[in-house]
Image (cartoon, rainbow, N blue to C red):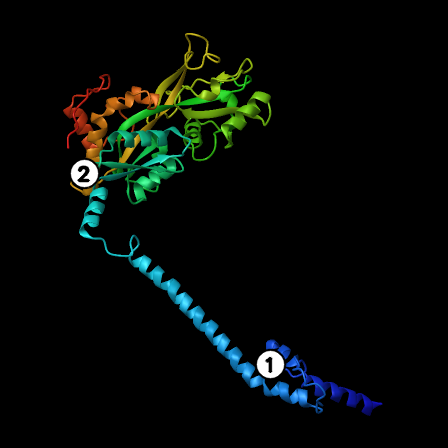
C-alpha cells in the first residue's frame, strides 16, 4: 500500500510539475505558474508521451520570465519618468511662481505701478461692521494707480492686531482700542509701533438682563453670554468685566440662541453682553416680558476711563425697555482705524500719508445714504484714550484747523 501511494504521488508530480508550495526557494511567479497549467491542444489521434506536458511547460519558463522582466522594467522606467515630470514643473514654479516665462518691460512696469500704492486693510468677520467700514473706505479712496486699498477678511480684533504687527502687506487695520491690551506683555513697545488715523465709531456696551437682575452686583456668579469667539463682545466684554471686578460664569454661544433661552427662562443665562453700535436690531423686534432691560454702567466706578468713553442708551434707541425721556448710562469701546508706524521717509510711510490725505479730504462722501449710518457721526479730530495719532493725520488736522466740534470742510485731494 505504501508503494501504491508513492506511485500515485509520483504521477501527480509528473502531471503538475515540481511542487510549488513545498519548495520555499522557488521564485516562480504566480502568473508563470498559471501559464504553465494551460495545455496546448493535441492533434487528433496523436499520442502524447508520458511526461511530455512537464517538459514542454518548463521549457517555456525562460521565455515568460524574460517577458515579465521586460514588463517590470518598463513600469519602473515609466514611474521614474512620471516623477521627474512632476518634480520639474514644481521646481520651475518655486523659482518662478507667477509665470512660465519672464515678464517683458510693459508687464514689469504694470506690476510695479499696481503695487507701488497698494495698502492692505485688515477688516474683520464677514458678518461684522468693521469689514463693511473697510470696504467703504476702499470705495472712497481708491483712485486708479494713485491709491489702491485691499480690504482683508479676518477672524476679529485680535487677529487684526497680529496682522498689523506681523503680516506682510498689511499697513492698516480696524481694531478695538482695548485690543492692544493683551499684546502689551508680549510687545512692550506696542504703543510706538501702532498708532491710529481715525476714531471711526463707538461700540456701546449693552448688558441685557433678566427681570431678577437689578444691578451689576447681582450678576456675580451668574451665567453671562459674550457671543461667539472673534466678536467684539467676546473679546472686550470679559476685559470690561474683569476691570469692574465682576466674577461671572462666561459662555460664548451665538447671541440669538442665548436670547431665546433668556426669553424662555432656560439655560440659566442671566445676561447677554453686546458691544456694537446702537441700536441693536435684536432688541427692536419681538416682545419681551416686564422686567427685561439694560443695566447702567458708570465709567467712574472702575478702571475704565483709560480705555473707554462714556455713552448712553436712550428711549429713542430702545423704546420697549427704556421709558420715554430717560437714559441708561454705559460706556463705549472706540473702534479705530489703526496703522503701523513705519519710519518717516519709507515707502510704506508714504502710502499711509496718501491714504490719510484721500480719506480725510473725502470724508463728506461717506454721508451718502448707501454708506453705514455711523459715518455721519465720525469726527476727524476725535481722540482715542491711551493711543497716539499717526503723525501725518495729526498734521492734516492741524493744517486744516479741524476741531472736535467742527464739521470737516471739503478739501481738495493733494497728490
Element type where label 1 sits in the image: loop
Residue at image coords 21%, 30%:
358
Q: Which mark is residue 296?
A: none
Looking at the rendered structure, the secondary structure element under dot 2 is helix
Residue pictured at 25% horizontal, 33% vertical: 142
Q: Which residue is mark 2?
A: 350
Residue 388: image quadrant is: top left
In what quadrant of the picture does the N terminus appear? bottom right
Task: From this view, report whether residue 395 is shown above or below residue 278.
Answer: below
Q: Are marks 1 and 2 in contact (CB under 8 Å)?
A: no
For the point 21% across and 49% down, which residue is it? Answer: 107
**Percent from the top left, x then y, of residue 242?**
43, 30
Q: Nearer the viewer, residue 310 or 107?
A: 107
Q: Disc 1 designates what residue?
A: 28
The image quadrant that residue 34 belongs to is bottom right
Near-viewer residue (87 or 331) = 87
Q: Earlier in the sequence, mark 1 or mark 2?
A: 1
Instruction: Name the residue: 39% across, 35% down.
Output: 156
Q: Nearer the viewer, mark 1 or mark 2?
A: 1
Between 17 and 358, the one lying in front of the other is 17
Front in this rendered view, residue 247 or 228: 228
Q: Position of residue 200 (x, y in %)?
A: 30, 26
User: In the image, is residue 54 above or below residue 35?
Assistant: below
Residue 292 appearing in the image: yes
Q: Is residue 111 left or right of residue 283?
A: left
Q: Position of residue 377 (x, y in %)?
A: 30, 19
The quadrant of the image that shows the C terminus is top left
Q: Which image quadrant is residue 268 in?
A: top right
Badge 1 local density, few (<14 within 10 Å), some, or many (20+)? Answer: few
- Estimate the x, y position of residue 134 in percent, counting from the top left: 32, 32
Amino acid at each position: 500500500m505504501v508503494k501504491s501511494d508513492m506511485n500515485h504521488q509520483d504521477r501527480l508530480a509528473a502531471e503538475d510539475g515540481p511542487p510549488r508550495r513545498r519548495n520555499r526557494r522557488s521564485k516562480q511567479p504566480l502568473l508563470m505558474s498559471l501559464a504553465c497549467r494551460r495545455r496546448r491542444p493535441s492533434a487528433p489521434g496523436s499520442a502524447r508521451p508520458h511526461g511530455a506536458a512537464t517538459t514542454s511547460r518548463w521549457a517555456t519558463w525562460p521565455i515568460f520570465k524574460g517577458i515579465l522582466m521586460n514588463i517590470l522594467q518598463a513600469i519602473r522606467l515609466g514611474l521614474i519618468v512620471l516623477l521627474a515630470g512632476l518634480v520639474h514643473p514644481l521646481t520651475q514654479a518655486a523659482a518662478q511662481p507667477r509665470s512660465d516665462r519672464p515678464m517683458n518691460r510693459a508687464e514689469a512696469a504694470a506690476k510695479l505701478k499696481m503695487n507701488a500704492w497698494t495698502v492692505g486693510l485688515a477688516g474683520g468677520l464677514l458678518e461684522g461692521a468693521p469689514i463693511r467700514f473697510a470696504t467703504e473706505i476702499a470705495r472712497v479712496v481708491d483712485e486708479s494707480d494713485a491709491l489702491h486699498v485691499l480690504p482683508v477678511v479676518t477672524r476679529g480684533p485680535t487677529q487684526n492686531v497680529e496682522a498689523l504687527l506681523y503680516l506682510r502687506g498689511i499697513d492698516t487695520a480696524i481694531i478695538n482700542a482695548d485690543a492692544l491690551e493683551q499684546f502689551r506683555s508680549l510687545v512692550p513697545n506696542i504703543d510706538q509701533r501702532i498708532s491710529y488715523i481715525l476714531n471711526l465709531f463707538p461700540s456701546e456696551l449693552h448688558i441685557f438682563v433678566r427681570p431678577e437682575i437689578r444691578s451689576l452686583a447681582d450678576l456675580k456668579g451668574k451665567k453671562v453670554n459674550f457671543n461667539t469667539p472673534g466678536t467684539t463682545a467676546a473679546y472686550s466684554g470679559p476685559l470690561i468685566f474683569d476691570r469692574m471686578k465682576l466674577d461671572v460664569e462666561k459662555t460664548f454661544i451665538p447671541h440669538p440662541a442665548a436670547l431665546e433661552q433668556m426669553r424662555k427662562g432656560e439655560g440659566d443665562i442671566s445676561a447677554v453682553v453686546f458691544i456694537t453700535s446702537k441700536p441693536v436690531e435684536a432688541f427692536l423686534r419681538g416682545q419681551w416680558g416686564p422686567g427685561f432691560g439694560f443695566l447702567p454702567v458708570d465709567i467712574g466706578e472702575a478702571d475704565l476711563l483709560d480705555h473707554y468713553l462714556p455713552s448712553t442708551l436712550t428711549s429713542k434707541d430702545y423704546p420697549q425697555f427704556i421709558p420715554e425721556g430717560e437714559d441708561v448710562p454705559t460706556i463705549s469701546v472706540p473702534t479705530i482705524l489703526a496703522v503701523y508706524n513705519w519710519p518717516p521717509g519709507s515707502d510704506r510711510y508714504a502710502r499711509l500719508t496718501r491714504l490719510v490725505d484721500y480719506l480725510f479730504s473725502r470724508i463728506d462722501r461717506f454721508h451718502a445714504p448707501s454708506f453705514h449710518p455711523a459715518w455721519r457721526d465720525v469726527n476727524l479730530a476725535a481722540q482715542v484714550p491711551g493711543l497716539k495719532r499717526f503723525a501725518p493725520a495729526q498734521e492734516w488736522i492741524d493744517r486744516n484747523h479741524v476741531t472736535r466740534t467742527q464739521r470737516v470742510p471739503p478739501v481738495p485731494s493733494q497728490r
